[in-house]
Amino acid sequence: MLGRLKEVLGVSLDWLITGKGAMRGDGPESNDRDGLDEGFFTQIVDGIVDALRGLGQPAEARAVAMQAATWYNDLKATCGTDDERMLGLRVMLRRLSRQGGD
């Protein structure tokens, strides 16, 4: 599963698992990923982690990565502008904070 996230998102497995180091790997395949908005993806990850911590729930790397990838794809597919994506993210994070991730 993590290998698939690495492939689809073009991110380093070390970064995905630990949150440390470069988001992108040093391999040639990482340079082929122009479609990932790293800043927006990072905002999603950070928001999910903050919401889970606020609920007293663990922010397990795999679960956070999967949720962030799903939200990223959904927001990119359904929102036409950066402002719409940010609004959508705020709504999703508010819902997560209120419902505990259900």
Image (tube, rainbow, N blue to C red):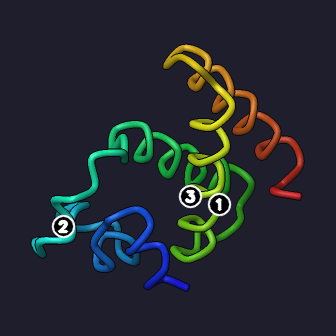
Q: Amino acid at mark 2?
A: Gly
Q: Amino acid at mark 3?
A: Ala
Q: CA distance from mark 3 to mark 1?
A: 6 Å
Image coordinates of residue 37 in percent, x first then y, are 36, 40
Q: CA distance from mark 2 to mark 1?
A: 21 Å
Task: Please name whichever residue, 14 or 94, is drawn nearer the observer in this view of the structure.
Answer: 14
Q: Earlier in the sequence, mark 2 or mark 1?
A: 2
Labels 3 and 1 touching (C-beta < 8 A): yes
Q: CA distance from mark 2 to mark 3?
A: 19 Å
Which numbered circle lies on residue 21?
2
Image coordinates of residue 61 in percent, x first then y, are 51, 74
Q: Quadrant of the C terminus?
A: bottom right
Question: What element does badge 1 sit on?
Answer: helix
Q: Which residue is mark 3?
A: 69
Q: Amino acid at mark 1?
A: Gln
Image coordinates of residue 82 in percent, x first then y, are 49, 19
